[in-house]
Image (cartoon, coloured by chain):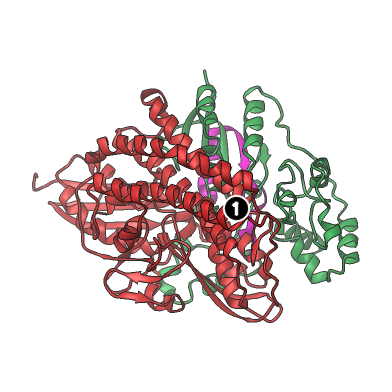
Amino acid sequence: MSAAKEVSINVEHLTRVEGHGNIVLNAKNGDVKKIEWQVSEAPRFFESFVRNRPYTELSHLTSRICGICSIGHALASLKATENAMDIKISKQTKLLRKIALHGENMQSHILHVGYLVAPDLFKVGSVFPLISSAPETVKKIIRLHRLANEMSELLCGRTTHPISLVPGGFSEIPSEKQLQNLKKRLVESLPTCTEVANVILDNAHMLPHFTRETEYIGLTSKDEYALYDGIVGSTDTGTHPVKDYESVVNEFVVPQSTAKYTKHNRESYMVGALARFNLNADLLSPSAKELAKKFDLQPINYNPFMNNIAQIVEYVHSVEDSIQLIDTILDQGLKCDEKPTKFVIKKGRGVGAIEVPRGILFHDYTYNKEGICTKANCVIPTNQNHNNIQKDMEVFAPDLLEKPKDEITLNLEMLVRAYDPCISCSTHYLDVKFVDE
Amino acid sequence: MKPKIAFFDFASCEGCQLQVANLEESVIDVAEVVDVVEFREVMTNKAESYDIAFIEGSITRPIDEKRLKAIRKKTKTLVALGTCAHLGGVQRLSNQWSAKENLKEVYPDAKEKDINKNEFFEKPHHKAVDEVVKVDYVIPGCPIDRTEFIKVLVALIHGKKPPIPDYPVCVECKKKENICLFTIGKFCMGPIARAGCGAICPSHGSECEACRGYISHPHERAQIDVLEDCGLSADEIMHRKTMFTYKYVEKEKEESK
């Protein structure tokens, strides 16, 4: 590298991510002077405005935190409310909710890998050029996306912002015929999953080889690949009860971000598909395990870019597990007219934890005796990743300085994109800024 | 030449833009008739001018107003996409408190120096898009209905006025032969809420919360009477009126001053 080289990058409002974030890099004479991941999303104050709202509204209001993971937010919200008021749900409700959650994970993962990351692997700016250059692949990706959405629609009444999920159960339950049809389509989709995975596999060499040891946090369970249920697991410190979540996330505020940051055992930690894989890989479905092997993905993997691959692996897991869940529901006899559990409104505090596409999510509500929310706290997966993104950048950027400016930018953008940040959740925007001194 | 369309997002969940991706195979047809020149959520490209700009999200801070005004200058037609852009979204409920109170509730541990004089945190207060710039058309809903999005897009491409209904959700609900939620002890905003969603919430057993706003001439007094007859208190009625529609409450307060 030429000793006098100055690099100044300022990506304002990074593209192909959900929400608004900026990357600022400032380097001189081969030294990085400043590398900063900024979150400029406008704050929406969910935790403030849900105060004084009745318990019936909470899951509907908080699902609006994120369009992509609205089902996950609704479920975390319902779990928090149900824990606060001691509401038990039926076995069928839990099984149906797990399918709804799989539908959302599939939708979000294929959207990210197929529409947002694939353009990087094919060196184009968006999915649109791929419509003409790789039409068959794009159509397969769309088919998988459609299946995921139709699944959410069947279980929740709508793909985005669920209608039928209510405290204690469902306001509407799909019919046996609809579930059988869904199962058939899930089975039929498995070869398409393999074909799309193979296209990614052929282009996986485009993902940078970068590793940095960090802590991974997510739900974990002895019985299953934890998504709906579980306790908090860490690759550093073992397990923690959900109710102690505050001492795991340790939220704090930094001036370059309207999203809060978190840290636990080290200076930062990562959540999401790769964290779940690193914690729970042995409980994946058979085809998902096979697929991970094809990509040489083994726990503990410290390459954040492999999060994209973990998402494909999880898509397949969700398909196979949903087939199993439908079988279980039908074997025990579907109760189409099952009403939500009856309960008495009471005061109390409840925490709900759930794994959503981007990682572990916590909702924590306090209700008064009328069932009105008086205090709320939501800890969003992307918030938990911001600090880890920053620390990755600090290690990744110095190695990039010899590259041309547009390649440095692309690499930094790809790093952030690998986390599949949902910045609007965390509060929104990706811009890389090269700042001139 | 194909019309140039662009999507922009402000404070929102981005669920309305997601409905465009959720058009699935039809996205390919859309890409044939329009040129998508800017859509940050899914593409890297940027453009200098647009024929139609779709705006999602509520407008919150001075930096957001500045960005919106710049977009308005670059576009021929501007469409507010979804409830946040149309009415201010659920986050408008936070306007009940001052910016300082909201910041304190959400960032209680923040150091004053980190938040003060920081444009990311400057005077957050949620507004609808038409409270900042001229809006030509609205596609209402939380989220928008994707078939309605296509209908509006087709109308705009042909230089026609978009077909947004101006009758209540009850009309669509009746057409579907749903059992009226009022008859089973639930309360609904259907009588004054704008249709176009296919009465999707009541059809799945949930009350309508008027996410598409009110029709042009709502019988608000009659709706209040109905809710009172059902035994709701004044407070509860106010709640029913606010989940997505706090804009109207703010307007009433403004007018009664």
Is residue B72 positioned above or below B143 on the image? above
Which chain is displayed in green in the rendered image?
B
- Is A235 left, or right, of A357 in this rendering? left
x, y percentage for residue A17? 41, 47
User: Furthest residue to the top?
Assistant: B1
| SS type, badge 1 | loop
Q: Position of residue A391 (x, y in %)?
A: 26, 61
| Nearer the observer, A247 or A296 | A296
- Residue A2 highlighted magenta (yes or no): no
Q: In front: B76, or A131?
A: A131
What letter labels the chain drawn in red? A
* Residue B84 colored in magenta in the image: yes
Q: Is residue A389 left or right of residue B150?
A: left
User: Is B124 or A267 nearer to us in this picture?
Assistant: A267
Quadrant in which the C terminus of chain B is drawn: bottom right
Residue name at image x 85 percent, y 46 percent:
B217
Q: Which residues are magenta?
A: B65-93
Q: Residues within 10 Å of mark 1 (few under 14, many from 20)?
A: many
Q: Looking at the image, is B136 positioned above or below residue A257?
A: above
Q: Which residue is mark 1?
A: A161
Q: What chain does badge 1 belong to?
A: A
The reply, left or right, for residue B75 in relation to residue A262 is right
Spot occupied by residue A71 in the image (x, y as percentages of width and height) = 55, 56
